[in-house]
Image (cartoon, rainbow, N blue to C red):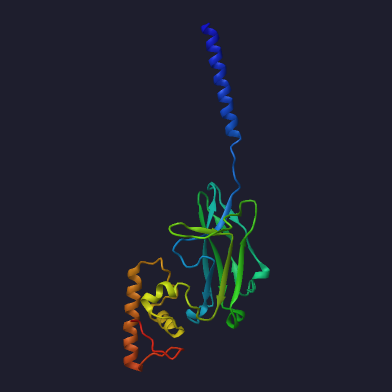
Amino acid sequence: MKKNLIYILLFGFLIGFGACKKSELQTYKDISRIYFYRQYGGINFDSSTYSFAVRPDSVTRDTMWLPMRIMGIASNTERTAKIDVVADSSTAIAPDDYELLPVKVAANSYTTLLGIVVHRSSNVQKKEVRIRLAIGTNTDFSPGVANAYPGGQTAGGTASYLVKINNTVTKPGNWDDWLVYFFGDYSEVKYRFVIQVTGQADFPDTLPIGIFSVYQSMCQEALDQYMQDNGPLIDENGKEVSFY
């Protein structure tokens, strides 16, 4: 009787072990995906603009970097993502206006950057050009999050992204809801003055608030000096520039 009980228990163990092995073999593994990362609290959710107008004339080319993230488990080998240009939604011409750099995801990494080399071409000098980017499919990745908008403390993602290149001063996307508290109402003359004084053309609201207070003080001091030397600084709307 005891021997029969031992056989029954041993048989049950083998059946259970076999089921576990079978379960392990049938574990589902999703395909790897990648997407453009949308940071919560950021200003460039759907597009980014590069303006040569706020750079010195000596700058004829530069590189933009767009953050990307993978979905799934990191690989122990380097992988490459495929980035397509949507022709019917793009006006920029490669390689005259821009070049896309290879997108490589390092081993054991969940993040990477897409580099876009932008050129101050004759085409860009005349008008704003656009590049509509879309994540393609290759042996390493398929498109990830199609359209997840960030909100609260939650980041988002998208499989499509718009890049704009121009040689004109473009109002920052976060001026009316953030920069206005430090620099006042927007004007092109004021914005150029801010860039000249601070040496900065981009003011993301993810920077520490103290930095914006410093920039405000720098601009007001520079404006006070300008007014002593030249009188009031008048913008394109006929209004006197002020940072109060």
> Residue at horizontal 48%, vertical 58%?
155
Q: Quadrant of residue 186?
A: bottom left
Q: Position of residue 14 (x, y in %)?
A: 57, 21
Which quarter of the figure is the C terminus placed in? bottom left
Determine if residue 161 is in view: yes
> Residue at horizontal 60%, vertical 71%?
98
> Is 192 placed above or below 27 here?
below
Residue at the top extreme? 1
> Is 35 placed above or below 186 here?
above
Q: Position of residue 156 (x, y in %)?
A: 51, 58
Residue at the right extreme? 88
Q: Quadrant of residue 101?
A: bottom right
Count of number-bearing discs: 0
> Is 240 placed above or below 19 here?
below
> Residue at horizontal 35%, vertical 72%?
212
Using the image as rendered, state which of residue 95 and residue 242 is in the foreground.
242
Q: Position of residue 226 (x, y in %)?
A: 35, 89
Q: Quadrant of residue 132?
A: bottom right
Using the image as rendered, state which of residue 84 and residue 13 is in the foreground.
13
Using the image as rendered, state which of residue 186 and residue 115 is in the foreground.
186
Q: Position of residue 64 (x, y in %)?
A: 52, 68
Determine if residue 55 is in view: no
Residue at the bottom extreme? 230
